Image (cartoon, rainbow, N blue to C red):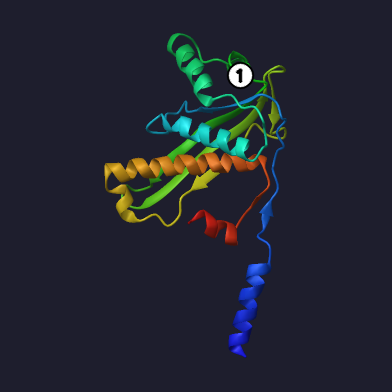
């Protein structure tokens, strides 16, 4: 009897659909660019900003959420040139410089691999806004200044923060995970249980 109950429970677990999360915001299918800003210099090396932006861009294209996305490299190039000689451009102006209609603006809040220098605890967070270039106004969120996104890597082996090569790989993985979490704000996806197990493979 105990064995059959266990089997039944297992079957129920398998056939029950994964819990899902609806898109928090539906993007317009217009020319869009993703820009990751790090005014606090929390992300090292800084090239990881592009890793995050590229992951968001790739995911939105692969999920067919938007059909036209500007390469993040283009807007990063404009930002870097302008920051070198002038005050930082407003978000809408950055979008206009690459002929985008909408900017997905990501402002990094934190990015770290450990809290104490010994225990691996890769965690990143950012504030997210969607900006209309033509109207120079926030499209999302409308009820607060920005939407908070957090990403973590779980079950990381301690040795991964002991060598420079592993630290670089881990930082890249965390940047990818943050990009994934940002993109998921804009499309329906599975969460928990089987979804989590698939992510760990």
What is the x, y in percent for residue 37? 51, 27
What is the x, y in percent for residue 166? 32, 45
State the residue in front, 123 or 102.
Answer: 102
State the residue in front, 60 or 149.
Answer: 60
The N terminus, quarter of image: bottom right
In the shown orientation, is residue 187 left or right of residue 88?
right
Task: Say which residue appears at 52% left-offset and 32% top-offset.
Answer: 53
What is the x, y in percent for residue 98? 59, 16
Please, is residue 166 above or below residue 90 in the view? below
Task: Looking at this view, name the residue that lies furthest to the top.
Answer: 85
State the residue in front, 174 or 100.
Answer: 100
Task: Say which residue appears at 66% left-offset and 73% top-offset.
Answer: 12
What is the x, y in percent for residue 65? 67, 36
Find disc 1 in the rendering and name its residue: 95
Image-quadrant location for residue 56: top right
Task: Say which residue appears at 63% left-offset and 31% top-offset.
Answer: 129
Mark 1 is surrounded, within 10 Å at the Cα level, by few (under 14), some (14 to 19) or many (20 or more) other residues, namely many
Please, is residue 15 above or below residue 63 in the view? below
């Amino acid at each position: 009897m105990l064995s059959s109950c266990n089997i039944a429970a297992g079957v129920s677990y398998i056939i029950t659909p994964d819990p899902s999360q609806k898109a928090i915001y539906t993007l317009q299918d217009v020319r869009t660019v993703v820009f990751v800003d790090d005014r606090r210099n929390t992300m090292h090396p800084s090239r990881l900003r592009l890793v995050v932006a590229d992951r968001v861009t790739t995911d939105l294209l692969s999920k067919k959420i938007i059909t036209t996305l500007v390469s993040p490299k283009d807007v990063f190039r404009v930002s870097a040139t302008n920051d070198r000689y002038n005050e930082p451009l407003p978000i809408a102006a950055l979008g206009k410089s690459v002929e985008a209609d909408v900017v997905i603006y990501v402002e990094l809040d934190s990015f770290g691999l450990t809290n104490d220098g010994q225990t691996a605890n890769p965690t990143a967070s950012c504030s997210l806004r969607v900006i209309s270039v033509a109207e120079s106004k926030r499209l999302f969120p409308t009820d607060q200044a920005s939407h908070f996104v957090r990403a973590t890597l779980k079950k990381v082996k301690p040795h991964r923060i002991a060598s420079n090569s592993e630290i670089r790989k881990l930082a890249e993985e965390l940047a990818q995970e943050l990009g994934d979490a940002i993109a998921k704000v804009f499309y329906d996806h599975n969460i928990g249980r089987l979804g989590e197990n698939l992510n760990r493979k």
